[in-house]
Image (tube, grey):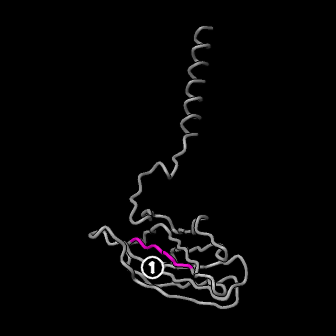
Amino acid sequence: MKKRILSFLGSMAILVSAFSTSAMNVDASDIDLKKVDGSYLTTEDYSKGVSSDRTRGQHMMDGECSISKAGTKRVYCYGATTANHEVDYLAVIVYVDQYIEEKDAWSQVDWWMVEKENDFFVNTGKSITVDKGYYYRVHADHFVREGDDPIEETFSFTDGILVPKSN
């Protein structure tokens, strides 16, 4: 009888140990990622950035940008500006940066701008060819103007995503 109880307790200890080990999760925020000029260097396939709520204005609602892998040597980059209502002028400028490890800094590789009048939303996106083995990010400037009011501006930026040397 004593052997059965010890055997049962041993089995339960192993079972509890197995369940508690498998229940442990690793949170991505617990992993130390390098941060350069506000952007983490990640191995994700996609990253999105949204302007801060503190930058909302009388006419500006928000701005956003994103970057995603679009093939072995391509990334898709996107930017959008949204106003609270129809405004006289909106614009978004999208910048694509490559991380240069030797300089520990971002270097611009492409940019473009889209403007719109008498609307509340403007967006743009395009796929660009990039070099393998580097991190890429997008940051965007967002502008809104209504009447004689000053131009309202905000910004957004993504984390860096790695385009690996080999897939």
| SS type, badge 1 | strand
Which amino acid lies under the numbered mark 1 shown in the image of this protein? Val
The residue lying toward the viewer, choosing from 43 and 54, is 54
Read off the magenta span. 135-142
Compare residues 59 and 52 and report the one nearer the observer. Answer: 59
* In magenta stretch: residue 108: no
Q: Residue 41, percent across and down?
A: 42, 63
Q: Which residue occupies the extreme front position in the image?
A: 148
Please state which of residues 7 and 140 is positioned toward the viewer in this rendering. 140
Q: Where does residue 52 sit, x and y in percent of width and height?
A: 57, 65
Which residue extends farthest top?
Answer: 1
Residue furthest out toward the left? 102
Is residue 9 placed above or below 92 in the rendered structure?
Answer: above
State whether residue 149 is above or below residue 133.
below
Q: Image quadrant for the C terminus? A: bottom left
Decide which of 136, 87 is in the foreground and name it.
87
* Residue 163 visible within the image: yes
Looking at the rendering, in which quadrant would you find the N terminus?
A: top right
Q: Name the residue beneath numbered marker 1.
A: 96
Q: Residue 160, position in %: x, y?
A: 45, 68
The spot of residue 43 in percent (x, y) is 45, 64
Count of marks placed on residues: 1
User: Residue placed at 64% from the left, 75% from the top?
Assistant: 60
Q: Quadrant of residue 133?
A: bottom left
Which residue does the image show at 60% across and 24% down from the upper left?
A: 12
Q: Residue at x 51, y 68 (%)?
A: 45
